Amino acid sequence: MVILRTSPTSPYGRKACIAAAVLGLQEQVKVDWADTRASEGSLYEQNPLAKVPTLLLENGDIVYDSRVALELLDTLAGGGKIIPADDTRISVLTKQATADGITDAAIQAQIETRNHPEEHWNRTWIDRQQGKVDRTLKAFNDHPLPTPTDTNGIPDCAQIALACSLGYLDLRANGDWRQNNPKLVHWHDVFVAQVPAYNETQAPEMLERS
């Protein structure tokens, strides 16, 4: 049994939860909620970065971050399912990293606005992060990823990462990304319809809004 330590609102942890579901690993992976806000505790002992997802393996090994976690889960499922084994592998991994970058930048902007009163915000920093988000959203809008039906019914790691990034923007940025990215909105709607695990892994705050 693999223990998947994550938190209900983590977009990175959500990637691993969705991956486990679409790979049919629910019986092999147990989700264990971790308190990422605590200044000490078991997560710090398991992962010096105290970040999620952190996977605890039966042999005692510990695996993190989300990209490595998805590699591991794909391997457990036989390989070549959410991470291609053919010559598209590097392209898909690059797109996964690009999608993760949306989340990275959005979180950096959120940290600035959450941790300081508005009069002390570093607006240059916030604008820089928002610029990364906006440019990357435009890139995915202009060149949409395949949908799960295009990849034999199973979303690849890039699709999972992008869906989780957009979900995070819905959670923390009130869905503002939807205004200028109609193709991306359509792509997201299709992903949600084709991957039940997306709604099954919604953050509690999003469920309360629905």
Image (spheres, grey):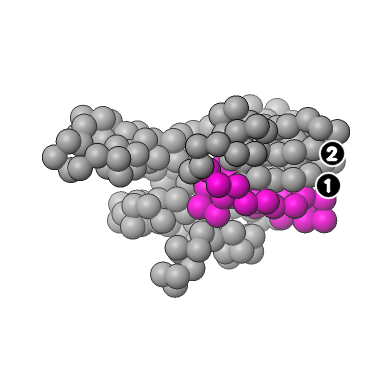
Q: Position of residue 129 (x, y in %)?
A: 32, 34
Q: Is residue 162 magenta?
A: no
Please give the name of the residue rendered at 40% of the width and 40% of the height, measured from the top-left corner: 107
Looking at the image, do the residues carrying marks 2 and 1 touch, with CB atoms under 8 Å apart? yes
Q: Position of residue 75 (x, y in %)?
A: 80, 37
Along the viewing direction, whichever of 183 and 95 lies nearer the viewer: 95
| Left or right position of 39 against 55 | left
- Residue 108 in view in this figure: yes
Question: What label sits on residue 1 in the rendered view?
Answer: 1
Element type at mark 1: loop
Please give the name of the residue rendered at 79% of the width and 37% of the height, measured from the top-left corner: 57
User: Can you identify the residue that label 2 sits on?
Assistant: 58
Q: Amino acid at mark 1?
A: Met
Mark 2 → mark 1, Cα distance in angstroms: 6 Å
Along the viewing direction, whichever of 7 and 23 lies nearer the viewer: 7
Please give the name of the residue rendered at 60% of the width and 39% of the height, measured from the top-left corner: 41
Circle 1 Cα neighbour tier, 10 Å, few/some/many (<14 / 14–19 / ≥20)? few
Query: Nearer the N terminus, badge 2 or badge 1?
Result: 1
| Left or right position of 127 against 72 | left
Circle 2 Cα neighbour tier, 10 Å, few/some/many (<14 / 14–19 / ≥20)? few
Q: Is residue 31 magenta?
A: yes
Q: Position of residue 78 (x, y in %)?
A: 84, 41
Give the quarter of the figure containing the C terminus: bottom left
Q: Which residues are magenta?
A: 7-36
Please give the name of the residue rendered at 41% of the width and 70% of the height, measured from the top-left corner: 209
Position of residue 150 relative to residue 125, above or below, is below
| Residue most extreme to the front | 40
Element type at mark 2: loop
Question: What label sits on residue 92 in the rendered view?
Answer: none
Q: Amino acid at mark 2?
A: Glu
Along the viewing direction, whichever of 177 and 37 lies nearer the viewer: 37
